[in-house]
Amino acid sequence: MRFDNKVAVITGAGNGIGLAIAHAFVSEGATVVVAEINLAARERAVAELLAAGGKAFGVGVDVADEDQVAQLVVRTVAELGHIDILVNNAGVVAHRLLIDMDRETWDRQLAVQLTGPFLCAKHVARHMIEQGITGKIVNISSVAALMGRIKGGPHCASKAGLTLLTKVLAMELGEYHINVNAVAPGLIEVPAQRDEYNLSATYQERYLQEIPLGRVGQPEDIAKAVLFLASTDADWISGQLHVVDGGLMSGHLSFQGVHDYSLLHGH
Ligand SMILES: NC(=O)c1ccc[n+]([C@@H]2O[C@H](COP(=O)([O-])OP(=O)(O)OC[C@H]3O[C@@H](n4cnc5c(N)ncnc54)[C@H](O)[C@@H]3O)[C@@H](O)[C@H]2O)c1
């Protein structure tokens, strides 16, 4: 029970990776705040966490709205007394070529995935500093922070920006013993991804060839890394982007072919 008496605020915890992170935290004793914009997802997640024997409550928040983020902190502290861990996980999806991208879609993705983590970190860190809490902040980035993706302009830009936001926060909050790290997942099998990419057999087969460890990730793979970074085992780790992708970013198969013909043709 690494997180007994700890309070973890997880944005976007109503679904997918955030929900798995929430389950992992409550299973190790933490009280989880499901900070989620979608009412139905929020209620479903809280009910699920309580049914699993965990301690959880939901707060409706749009992480891109500073007043709502400030209220999230006020309500959590009023209810639970303190915040020890923040996981900036909320994300939105938009697939469009940049030449077809409307300003509204661009702005919204940047607002949720880059401005949101800034606002949440700002208000949670102020609370941690006031109460002398040696807290942990974990930002959920993506391998899209490290390589371009067609139709992923604002996604890649926001996640790349999050890497440097993580580093600046780590520098500014270090003197208060607040650690700030980021986790960059590869492709993780969540319901939203299944709908979005229609993870067909052909797609999976092609993608799997690029993953040295031979499988698509599960939300629990990311939760394990987040819990490590939020634990005392990571007390001397800060400002880093931790890639959790089954080895995807180790290299590109097509590039290997240039040097080793047998890899492409199997002989
Ligand atoms: N699934 C993947 O393959 C993958 C890979 C790399 C990175 N990520 C990142 O992981 C995070 C979670 O992704 P997921 O796949 O679980 O997505 P998801 O769509 O299943 O969950 C995202 C959650 O965030 C919530 N949300 C959206 N906007 C919000 C806002 N403004 N305020 C509060 N909550 C909001 C949604 O309602 C949803 O419940 C995202 O930041 C995403 O970019 C996912």
Image (tube, rainbow, N blue to C red):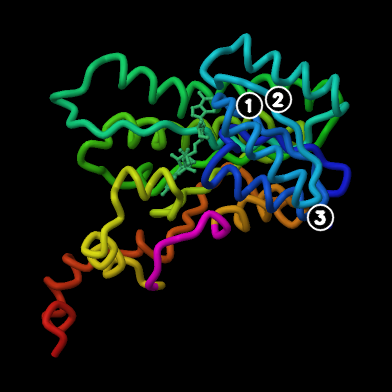
Question: Residue 94: which quarter of the image?
Answer: top left
Tell me the kind of residue under disc 1: Ala
Q: Is residue 206 left or right of residue 134?
A: left
- Snapshot quadrant of residue 170: top right
3 and 2 marks in contact (CB < 8 Å)? no
Look at mark 3 in the image and give the residue it sits on. 2
State whether residue 237 is above or below residue 122.
below
Q: Residue at x 52, y 52 (%)?
A: 242
**Nearer to me, 172 or 56:** 56
| SS at mark 3 in the image | loop
Q: Is there a contact, CB below 8 Å, between mark 1 and mark 2?
A: yes
Q: Which residue is mark 1?
A: 121
Given the image, on which type of amino acid does mark 3 rest? Arg
Cα–Cα gap, marks 1 and 3? 22 Å
Expressed as whole percent of the image width and height from the top left, the position of residue 56 reads: 76, 38
Quarter holding the C terminus is: bottom left
The amino acid marked with disc number 2 is: Val
Report, in whole angstroms, how far the alpha carbon at label 3 lies from the one at label 2. 21 Å
Height in image: 97 above or below 223? above
- In this rendering, would 97 be left or right of 223? left
Of marks 3 and 2, which one's residue comes earlier in the chain?
A: 3
- The earlier-in-sequence mark between 1 and 3 is 3
The answer for how far apart the CA atoms under marks 1 and 2 are is: 5 Å
| Residue 253 vertical placement versus 223 (above, below) | below
* Residue where numbered disc 2 is placed: 124
Residue at 71% x, 26% y is: 125
